[in-house]
Image: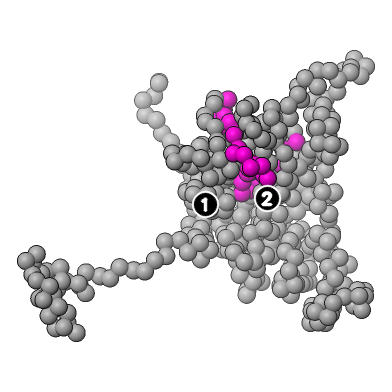
């Protein structure tokens, strides 16, 4: 080394703040499918349109919600639905007055890249995962309100949403950059089939087209873009916010999975499967499988076995940026199933490989307080982390501990009566 002084520069997570280069004009509002979310949803959309003069995008399925439509044939619905429909008459009227001003999109058909400045999620953690799935490249800042059952990733409350959203729109907010994993499946025989494709004129087909054609063939005519929007996922990859899970599916046999790290064989998993997760996903499925909980600002990838048939197979943490290759062992009795954030479940056959690495596109999640407070509050409220009965202080037992070892049981009994 020319310079013996090695210096490492580490960024302070508290320095990550939201800064708008221009005022946000378009906002995407995502809500979960629950009647209890309708009123906060309509109030928020009404306020954004009328007070903030913003262009509001919603999913096209929202317009098909029967509780927000007045042309539903109630005589064909159940008695309970008619009661709920009547209960939300006022909310429905307010929404219908705004309906023509909303811009809609359909998942899997419309590309939202560079169209959205800001995202607001109303619901549980699933709404944030859905927002991550919609944007397979750069993601706008996400503000998540707690209206679900757990709310580990949703730090905001809807009580005073006007003040909170205004602070965010003015740039007064901290950010947590939640890293994602870029996953891609490489099917057996891809390269061989590419070399056998005919020459068109003097030029070969583009490699990306070769992969797409081959992937369609291997999946019985179904496209292999994992549900990405308009080829928004390069090289048939998908970005996940929580984890990618490889499991044995309905097979009665153990999974036998080989793991490679940057091309080097690491180990084989014999058990129910494997979880490869982000630090954000460390408090999800990985935590249930015994992994450590890692702050989302830590650059890392977690590798956690699911019910390993070994007493010494512990979860590990590897550096962010490495490439994990996961494949079915040649002598495995069965194939495996693979899913991405709980979606797009498909089969991983012998000879196929799953490549996983850190994506360059994180999810900028807006903090209610700051990175540290939000995370530990979610640990305490969502998982009751380190909750136990407190040990009594030493003063209450000082008389007992001060007694010598030669004291008899009668003396201890007398001491208890004296204290009483």
Residue stretch rendered in magenta on the structure: 236-263
The residue closer to the viewer here, 215 or 114, is 215
Q: Is residue 358 visible?
A: no
Q: CA distance from mark 2 to mark 1?
A: 15 Å
Q: Residue at x 83, y 34 (%)?
A: 216
From the viewer's perspective, is residue 210 above or below residue 299?
above
250 part of magenta stretch: yes
State which quarter of the image contains the C terminus. Answer: bottom left
Name which quarter of the figure residue 219 lies in.
top right
Indicate left or right for 349 with 206 as reference: left
Other-residue count near label 2 (Cα within 10 Å), few / some / many at <14 / 14–19 / ≥20: few
Residue 116: percent from left, percent from top: 75, 53
Q: Residue at x 67, y 53 (%)?
A: 129
237 part of magenta stretch: yes
State which quarter of the image contains the N terminus. Answer: top left
Other-residue count near label 1 (Cα within 10 Å), few / some / many at <14 / 14–19 / ≥20: some
Indicate left or right for 72 with 281 as reference: right
Q: Residue at x 75, y 36 (%)?
A: 236
Q: How is the image coloured?
A: one colour
- Pointer 2 or 1: first along the chain: 1
Residue 321: percent from left, percent from top: 57, 35
The residue closer to the viewer here, 355 or 309, is 309
Helix, strand or loop for disc 1? helix
Residue 155: percent from left, percent from top: 58, 63
Q: Name the disc covering residue 373, or none.
A: none
Residue holding disc 1: 287
Helix, strand or loop for disc 2? loop
Residue holding disc 2: 342
Indicate left or right for 37 with 176 as reference: right
Name which quarter of the figure residue 417 lies in.
bottom left
Name which quarter of the figure residue 119 lies in.
bottom right
Residue 21: percent from left, percent from top: 67, 52
């Amino acid at each position: 080394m020319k310079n013996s002084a090695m210096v490492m520069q580490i960024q302070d997570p508290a320095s990550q703040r939201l800064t708008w280069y221009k005022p946000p004009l378009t906002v995407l509002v995502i809500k979960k499918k629950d009647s209890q979310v309708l009123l906060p949803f309509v109030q928020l959309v009404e306020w954004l349109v009328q007070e903030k003069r913003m262009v509001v995008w919603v999913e096209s399925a929202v317009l098909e919600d029967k509780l927000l439509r007045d042309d539903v044939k109630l005589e064909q619905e159940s008695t309970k639905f008619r009661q709920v429909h009547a209960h939300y008459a006022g909310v429905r009227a307010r929404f219908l007055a705004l309906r023509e001003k909303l811009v809609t999109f359909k998942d899997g058909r419309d590309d939202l890249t560079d169209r959205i400045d800001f995202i607001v999620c109303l619901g549980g953690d699933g709404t944030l995962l859905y927002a991550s799935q919609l944007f397979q490249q750069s993601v706008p800042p996400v503000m998540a309100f707690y209206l679900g059952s757990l709310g580990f990733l949703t730090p905001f409350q809807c009580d005073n949403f006007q003040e909170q959203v205004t602070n965010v729109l003015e740039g007064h907010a901290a950010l947590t950059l939640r890293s994602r994993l870029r996953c891609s499946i490489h099917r057996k025989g891809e390269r061989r089939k590419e070399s056998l494709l005919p020459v068109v004129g003097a030029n070969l087909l583009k490699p990306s087209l070769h992969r797409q054609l081959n992937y369609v063939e291997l999946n019985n005519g179904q496209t292999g873009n994992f549900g990405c929007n308009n080829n928004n996922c390069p090289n048939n990859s998908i970005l996940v916010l929580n984890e990618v899970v490889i499991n044995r599916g309905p097979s009665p046999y153990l999974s036998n999975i080989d793991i490679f790290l940057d091309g080097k064989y690491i180990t084989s998993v014999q058990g129910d499967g494997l979880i490869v997760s982000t630090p954000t996903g460390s408090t999800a499925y990985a935590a249930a499988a015994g992994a450590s909980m890692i702050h989302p600002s830590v650059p890392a990838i977690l590798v956690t076995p699911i019910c390993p048939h070994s007493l010494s197979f512990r979860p590990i943490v590897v550096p962010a940026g490495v490439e994990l290759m996961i494949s079915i062992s040649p002598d495995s009795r069965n194939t495996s199933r693979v899913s991405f954030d709980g979606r797009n479940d498909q089969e991983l056959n012998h000879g196929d490989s799953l490549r996983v690495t850190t994506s360059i596109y994180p999810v900028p999640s807006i903090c209610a307080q700051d990175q540290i407070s939000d995370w530990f509050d979610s640990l305490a409220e969502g998982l009751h982390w380190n909750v136990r009965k407190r040990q009594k202080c030493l003063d209450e037992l000082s008389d007992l501990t001060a007694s010598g070892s030669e004291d008899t049981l009668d003396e201890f009994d007398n001491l208890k009566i004296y204290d009483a």
